[in-house]
Image: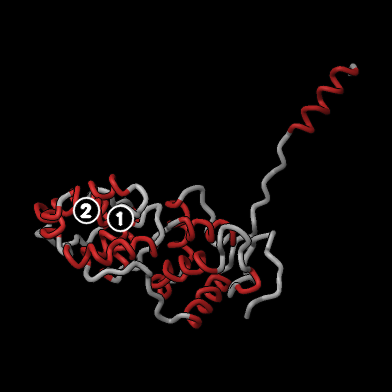
Amino acid sequence: MGKKATAKKRATAKAKPKKAVTPKRWSEREVVEAFTRFQNASPEPKGELVSVNNFTLLVAVVLSAQATDAGVNKATKALFQVADTPEKMAALGEEKLRDYIKTIGLYKGKAKNVIALSKMLIEKHNSQVPKTREELQELPGAGRKTANVVLNIAFGEPTLAVDTHVFRIGNRTGMAPGKNPLEVELELDHVIPARFKTHAHHWLILHGRYICVARTPRCPDCLISDLCRYPDKTVYAPSR
């Protein structure tokens, strides 16, 4: 073999990307242990969006896309005092609705969707929030995550809503890795025992919001740090 061929072979070998290391899969015992700890720490977790009925819950979740719950609650406090039914919201109209929610990101598109979904509820669902994922996803501005949140909170269904926090936890910890929210949702649904599913997405969302944050996760304060597969755990003196 000539010098050029040898050099080319070496260059090719160097250029090969390193094979990704797949973290060891969580055992059933570890998953049960994690959710038992979450349950013991917070037996009845609640979502942080404020609503007064199923309709306002639906609206709040639609408004929360790419926005914080605190920001949505601030905007909807006054809104829900004047429009807490599909009829009242439709009567309010898109322009007036914008005035209430203009502090929320993408408020123009969201106002359009909320008025449209209010009219659809009146015309197609007798002004009631539907109880199936398929019907909820047909509503303007309501995707799978919105449907899962509403099904869980309004109707007690054991659905798992995967937002940015849950997606991050599923992948970072190795509990439920996936390339997109649907993959993570399906994996969580597969590994989490039925007895934990009603509250599972609340535990995970709150954990991601306050402990397993995007930057500098609070690993020393984490209830499941010893189970987590994340290789770059934050190290500092714990606050508790």
Q: CA distance from mark 1 to mark 2?
A: 14 Å
Residue at (24% x, 59% y) in the render = 132
Q: Is residue 125 left or right of residue 9?
A: left
Q: Nearer the viewer, mark 1 or mark 2?
A: 2
Choose between 31 and 63: the one closer to the eye. 63
N-term-proximal mark, 1 vs 2:
1
**Mark 2 highlights which residue?**
97
Choose between 57 and 148: the one closer to the eye. 57
Quarter of the image containing the N terminus? top right
Choose between 240 and 191: the one closer to the eye. 240
Q: Which mark is residue 238?
A: none
Callout 1–callout 2 Cβ contact below 8 Å? no
Residue at (37% x, 70% y) in the render = 47
Where 35 sits versus 59, above or below? below
Q: How many marks?
A: 2
Is disc 2 placed on a helix, strand or loop?
helix
Q: Position of residue 200 (x, y in %)?
A: 43, 70
Residue at (21% x, 63% y) in the render = 55
Q: Position of residue 218 (x, y in %)?
A: 61, 68
**Mark 1 highlights which residue?**
62
Q: Is residue 135 left or right of residue 8?
A: left
Residue positioned most to the front: 99
